[in-house]
Image (cartoon, rainbow, N blue to C red):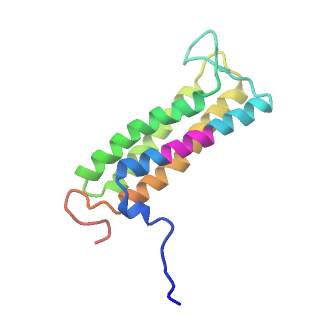
Amino acid sequence: MPTTNAVPADFLRTWPVWLVSALTGLAAAAVTELYGLAARALGVPMAAGNIGAGAAQPITVGMFAMGTIICTFWGTVLAVLLARYATRPARAYVQVAVALTAVSLVAPLGAGDTVTSTKVLLALAHLLAATIVIPTVARRLSHAPGRNGRRAGT
């Protein structure tokens, strides 16, 4: 009886970069939304203000998912451009995505009129989404030929 050594993540080699990024973003949106719902159920205050704001606005159901999808959209644009034009697209993607994730933490940590538990909750949501999206998209990009036509490590 023949056996196959099919790798479960073979789709990372064959599916388009935009599709892998979009599907990973949807998964991250679902996870972050569930995370937000769990925090809400545990009594974490769901109100935050903009940086320097004097009054917090409610964080409604769906906002975790919406924020994740918006950021993933722009991350997908970045990934597609890097796959097409970068010499080492996976490396470039990780560097830019990690830097943008770090910058994204400024908003929740600097939120005005927001309790510390909510600030931490929001910052962790950013990190949660990033830990789902960045490695998966980077792995897909490691199979992209890049600008010089060669795959990373060849």
Relative to the observer, which residue lies in front, 85 or 101?
85
Compared with residue 9, is residue 103 higher up or lower down, i.e. above or below? Answer: above
The spot of residue 77 in percent (x, y) is 34, 40
User: Quick check: 77 left or right of 124?
Assistant: left
The spot of residue 144 in percent (x, y) is 31, 60
Residue at the spot x=29%, y=49% of the render? 82
Compared with residue 61, is residue 34 higher up or lower down, i.e. above or below? Answer: below
Residue at the spot x=21%, y=56% of the render? 147
Magenta span of residues: 24-32
- Tally of marks: 0
**Does residue 31 belong to the magenta stretch?**
yes
User: Quick check: 46 left or right of 17?
Assistant: right
The spot of residue 16 in percent (x, y) is 34, 54
The spot of residue 134 in percent (x, y) is 47, 50
The image quadrant where one finds the C terminus is bottom left
Compared with residue 81, is residue 144 higher up or lower down, i.e. above or below? Answer: below
Compared with residue 102, is residue 109 higher up or lower down, i.e. above or below? Answer: above
**Does residue 83 belong to the magenta stretch?**
no
Q: Quadrant of residue 138?
A: bottom left
Q: Quadrant of residue 111?
A: top right
Relative to the observer, which residue lies in front, 60 or 119?
60
User: Quick check: 39 left or right of 104?
Assistant: right
Q: Among all residues in the image, which is located at the extreme bottom?
A: 1
Q: Main secondary structure of the magenta part?
A: helix
